[in-house]
Amino acid sequence: MATKEEIFSAVQDVLVDSLAVDADEVTPDATLLDDLGAESIDLLEIVFSLEKKFEIKIDRSELIPEDIFTDAQYVVDGRLTPAGLSIIADRLPNANMEVLEQNPMVQNVAKVLTVQSVCDLVEKKLQ
């Protein structure tokens, strides 16, 4: 099984190739959208590249848990409830939750994705 360092290095390579950023910008705490400039279409390419590189399958809902967005327990009027925030924090343990806590709108969920949260997902898939 790949080490954490090997996973990070491979994820870093994918992000550098997919987003045309410098490797030194791809730090564990960097957010994919705000810090690295990814757009939603880029996320699809990133997922495809990670699946190919690691020979794993990643469901889009594992990266952005859209399945909770239609449940009134988690979202009311486009805003995440405390239970919704908790679910996001559980599913994306290294996400930058500060963004969502300040403005818990559903459209901000993708903004919390960090390089580390992607690495953690890959590591989980490899187990």
Image: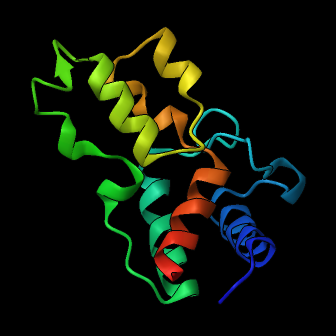
Query: Considering only vertical position in the picture, is 24 above or below 10?
Result: above
- Colour treatment of the image: rainbow
Q: Residue 90 lies in what quarter of the image? A: top left
- Residue 32 position within the rendered picture, expressed as x and y whole percent measured from the top left: 61, 45
Q: Nearer the viewer, residue 53 or 56?
A: 56
- In the rendered structure, the answer to whether residue 123 lies left or right of residue 104 reads right
Residue at coordinates 62% horizontally, 63% vertically from top-left?
119
The picture places residue 94, in percent across and down from the top left corner, at 60, 43
Q: Residue at x 74, y 41 (%)?
A: 29
Residue 97, quarter of picture: top right
Please provide percent x and percent y for residue 15. 67, 62
Q: Is residue 14 above or below residue 94?
A: below
Q: Total number of numbered labels?
A: 0
- The residue lying at 14 percent from left, 25 percent from top is 73
Quarter that holds the N terminus: bottom right
Q: Is residue 102 left or right of residue 15?
A: left
Looking at the picture, how far across and down is residue 100, in whole percent? 47, 20
Q: Residue at x 44, y 84 (%)?
A: 56
